[in-house]
């Protein structure tokens, strides 16, 4: 019952396993402002920008961003892009950590307009301001990846903006290492895989159509991976290890009721669910490459930016861990990278002419030089990638 109700109500709620405890309020509403008001806010800020730019003499170029997409608009949009010389890049989860640092690094070049796709509009606005990102270089649009309705609504909002899409960065993630029981997305999928993998899977599949229309010379679709999902590394061997097994839990819909909430069908483990979701991210990137690189020319890539031990990703961890993890990474493993450095790395994957290889998984050495890294056996298993793709497209309603 709770799961059925979940699909009918706002994505601002996440439902723990049926009968376990109360639903909790998730910070995807704007302190009580409804989703449609977020969207209105997107439009009114866009309208304000249009007005401002019109007054500055470029109104003819930008004013059409409020109009629904039409062939004429497509032409006008690409015209505006040429005039402005800026690419458009969507970054999910740009309200903190790696996503924010990447948005800042890209915006500072003056070559990119960043669509900050975030679940908390006010947090994102404050983050952009405090990072010093110039107003004309970003637009915030509401996206809650824990709701497939929200993903579809985001795509619709983006299309109405009239902007072409040149690069998509799937960066947002949740990590719930101390959770004793699974929590669920609006559609009833375990929250880590539902957000990190399924939400991004639907988003990137839908937005691929927009990217195909862009005439940008170096289109890229990037899904942030992690060393923790790769069991060919030391970090990837810290238990619980990622393992998708025979995908029986994923096939069952990860609902935690009659089926397991874990991809491999096992007992719930929040840390493993995160690592499994990262394996799905890396497999998805490769499957995109196999299926669509040749046809579209889009470069599909993933990366491990280094251990950014200070980000909000660890917010659900125990306080002692949060205290000790950054110095441990800085002085013992020496795998630590600052948010600033990690943002520069991801920005490189977005726009550096030397990182255009499709199907690549990028890492950086201790001198911050990029190289193409090896994925683990499971994270590079083509047959598993195909199955994850096919099951996922059923779960998100694409097949
Ligand atoms: N930190 C590391 O050491 C590390 C290492 C390897 C890879 N990564 C990867 O880097 C990426 C960014 O992580 P981070 O370290 O920068 O963590 P972070 O600071 O917690 O950023 C995560 C972002 O995801 C957003 N998010 C979470 N759930 C969402 C949802 N349902 N809908 C929309 N957005 C949502 C968060 O939004 P709110 O601000 O609203 O919470 C936040 O903006 C992740 O893919 C992570 O797996 C991180």
Image (cartoon, helix red, strand yellow):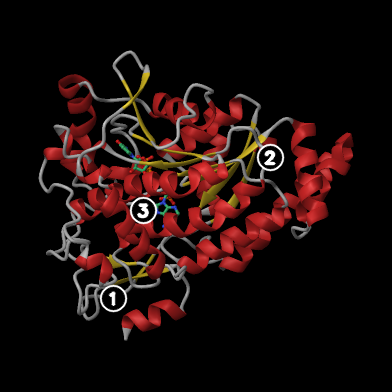
Select label 1 or label 2 by which is in front.
Answer: 2
In the rendering, which numbered label is found on residue 22? 1
Furthest-top residue in this view: 367
Residue 379 lies, with reference to residue 40, above or below; the image says above
User: Assess mark 3: CB under 8 A from ligand 1?
Assistant: yes
Q: CA distance from mark 1 to mark 3?
A: 23 Å
Pointer 3 local density, CA inside 10 Å: few below 14, some 14–19, many at least 20: many
User: Can residue 337 be seen at all in this image of the molecule?
Assistant: yes
Secondary structure category for the residue under label 1? loop
Q: Nearer the viewer, residue 16 or 22?
A: 16
Q: Who's the residue at 80% across and 39% down the image?
A: 79
Q: Who's the residue at 27% across and 25% down the image?
A: 336
Q: Which residue is mark 3?
A: 196
Residue 353 lies, with reference to residue 123, above or below; the image says above
Secondary structure category for the residue under label 3? helix
In the rendering, which numbered label is found on residue 215? 2
Who comes first in sequence, dot 1 or dot 3? 1
Who comes first in sequence, dot 1 or dot 2? 1
């Amino acid at each position: 019952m709770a799961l059925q109700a979940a699909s009918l109500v706002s994505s601002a709620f996440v439902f723990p396993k049926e009968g376990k405890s109360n639903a909790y309020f998730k910070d995807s509403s704007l302190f009580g402002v409804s989703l449609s008001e977020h969207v209105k806010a997107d439009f009114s800020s866009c309208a304000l920008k249009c007005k401002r730019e019109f007054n500055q003499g470029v109104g003819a170029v930008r004013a059409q961003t409020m109009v629904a997409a039409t062939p004429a608009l497509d032409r006008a949009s690409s015209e505006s892009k040429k005039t402005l010389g800026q690419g458009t890049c969507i970054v999910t989860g740009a309200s903190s950590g790696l996503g924010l640092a990447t948005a800042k690094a890209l915006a500072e070049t003056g070559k990119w307009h960043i669509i900050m796709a975030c679940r908390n509009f006010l947090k994102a606005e404050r983050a952009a301001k405090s990072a010093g990102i110039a107003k004309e270089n970003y637009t915030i649009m509401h996206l809650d990846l824990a709701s497939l309705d929200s993903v579809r609504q985001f795509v619709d909002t983006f299309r109405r903006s009239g902007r072409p899409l040149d690069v998509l960065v799937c960066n947002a993630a949740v990590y719930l290492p101390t959770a004793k029981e699974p929590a669920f997305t609006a559609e009833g999928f375990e929250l880590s895989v539902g957000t990190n993998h399924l939400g991004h899977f639907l988003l990137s599949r839908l937005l691929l159509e927009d990217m195909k229309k862009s005439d940008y010379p170096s289109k890229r679709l990037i899904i942030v991976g992690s060393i923790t999902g790769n069991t060919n590394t030391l970090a990837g061997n810290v238990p619980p290890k990622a393992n998708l097994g025979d995908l029986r839990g994923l096939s069952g819909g990860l609902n935690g009721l009659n089926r397991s909430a874990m991809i491999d069908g096992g007992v719930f483990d929040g840390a493993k669910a995160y690592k499994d979701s990262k394996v799905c991210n890396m497999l998805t990137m490769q499957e995109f490459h196999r299926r669509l690189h040749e046809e579209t020319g889009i470069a599909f890539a993933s990366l491990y930016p280094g251990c950014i031990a200070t980000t909000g990703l660890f917010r659900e961890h125990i306080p002692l861990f949060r205290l000790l993890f950054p110095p441990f990474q800085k002085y013992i493993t020496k795998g630590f990278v600052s948010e600033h450095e990690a943002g520069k790395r991801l920005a490189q994957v977005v726009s550096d002419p030397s990182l255009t290889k499709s199907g690549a998984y990028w890492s950086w050495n201790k001198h911050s030089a990029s190289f193409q890294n090896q994925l683990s056996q499971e994270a590079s298993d083509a047959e598993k990638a195909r199955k994850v793709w096919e099951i996922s497209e059923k779960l998100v309603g694409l097949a």
